[in-house]
Image (cartoon, helix red, strand yellow):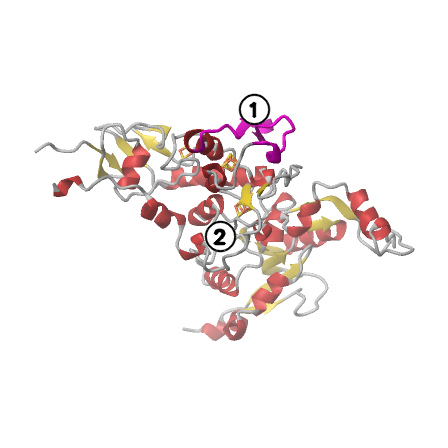
Amino acid sequence: MTDVTRRKLRVATTSLAGCFGCHMSLLDIDERLFPLLERIEFDRSPLTDIKHCGPCDIGIIEGGICNAENVHVLREFRANCKILVAMGACAVTGGLPAQRNHLDLGLCLQEVYLTDPGVAHGMIPNDPELPLPLDKVHPLHEVVKIDYFIPGCPPSADAIWKFLTDLIEGRTPKLGHGLIHYD
Amino acid sequence: MNERPSFLLDGDEVPFEPGQTVMQAALAAGRYIPHLCYHPEFTPHGSCKLCTARINGRLMAACTTPAETATEVESETEELNDLRRTLVQMLFAEGNHFCPSCEKSGNCVLQALGYDLGVMTAGFRHFFPDRPVDASHPEILLDFNRCILCELCVRAAREVDGKHVFSLAGRGLGKHLIVNAESGRLADTDVKVTDKAVEVCPVGVILRKRVGFATPIGARRYDKSPISAQALADAPRPLERNHD
Ligand code: SF4
Ligand code: SF4
Ligand code: FES
């Protein structure tokens, strides 16, 4: 087999309204990173620090959508990635950040920055550089088309590995018992 | 010797006792049909439709359809499992199911069905409804965010505990769980923490306080084996008749 001549798949990753736990879980595949890196190369990702996403085969997104910048990044990924993957509970369901969805955003900001005990001389941040928070937190599939979902908080390294190897080998990714988890 | 009556389930003969439903006969014969509101100890409710099978060509709930001879039942088909996945997805989108912080996680029937059917996303737009919890009772928490309206608590209270604690009120999207107290608070009902109704909730609505997260991840009920295997292990078996 002429493995060497096979083009490496280009993969972009990002964390939106997530905690980087899914990226940690991705790194948790440990020494399997070496065979993985023979098949893929990273484009935009916290691992490369490339700031914008070029044309890619696979985009992997951790975290849901909680502010305007998240929407722009998600659209950039969708426009550039042939296959877009929602990784982890927040990307798939909104997750922990979405627990604020039944609360009024203005009251949340007030409590956190003005009235919470321990806040002295507080003010709600208003630097124009800061992306505006959205009224509600959304899972990714409510904003763009998502091709695959890997649930889990975070998905285990084994689940991510199984998913990636299936996808890279051209199989339909399938997580069986023990690998599919919502928690 | 009399032949036992039987029907065909996905092409195989399944014997039944007169009076059994398709679901009861299938489980007793070691054949799994996915189900959510069916519970072997209570009167079938037929509301979740997870058990929908094609029975002589028509879509019917296996948990309420009586077993009959000369019937062909299809259950393990891509078409039906697709419909079942959609039902599970709708339940997830309709309530607030944040599994990572739910005490029922790992022991939850809805979640286990999602795993077994390969539900990777709720797919639909999440409702994110606002449903405050009722923590009034000293020993029992009621978290309405996760109620799937299966009425198992209603049935268990009525049929086993001999009381009327829970009920479903409203219709359609407004349907919701209520308790039998003028104040609307669980603390003012005659519910006891030892009631069957408290034990039976398949999801994380009726929860005993101060016992959450006692079992570590990996050792919980559906960590060990999928719900399809556990449902068969738990199914009531009739006395083995062919040995007598
Ligand atoms: S009730 Fe079940 S599905 Fe809902 S949040 Fe709890 S574990 Fe998840
Ligand atoms: S509280 Fe539990 S048992 Fe009762 S209807 Fe809701 S989900 Fe079913
Ligand atoms: S299990 Fe039959 S309708 Fe719910």
Do labels 1 and 2 touch, CB within 8 Å? no
Above or below for B7 versus A162: above
Over which residues does the magenta segment extend? B161-189
Q: Residue B226 location, x and y as percent? A: 40, 51
**Identity of the residue drawn at 12% across and 33% down:** B3
**Identity of the residue drawn at 69% across and 54% down:** A17
Q: Amino acid at mark 2?
A: Gly
- Left or right relative to B93: residue B22: left
User: Which residue ends up furthest to the right in the rendered image?
Assistant: A121
- Distance from Cα at disc 1 to Cα at disc 2: 30 Å
Q: Which residue is mark 1?
A: B171
Q: Residue B117 location, x and y as percent? A: 43, 46
Mark 2 CB within 8 Å of ligand 1: yes
Identify the element where label 1 is drawn. Answer: loop
Q: Badge 1: how crowded within 10 Å, few (<14), some, or many (20+)?
A: few
**Frontmost residue, B132 versus B113:** B132
**Identity of the residue drawn at 27% across and 40% down:** B28
- Left or right relative to B70: residue B129: right
Whether residue A12 can be seen here: no
**Identity of the residue drawn at 76% across and 49% down:** A68
Whether residue B51 can be seen here: yes
Q: Which residue is mark 2?
A: B106
Asked if the magenta segment contains residue B87, the reply would be no
**Frontmost residue, A56 versus B231:** B231
Which chain does tag 1 point to? B
Above or below for B184 versus B124: above
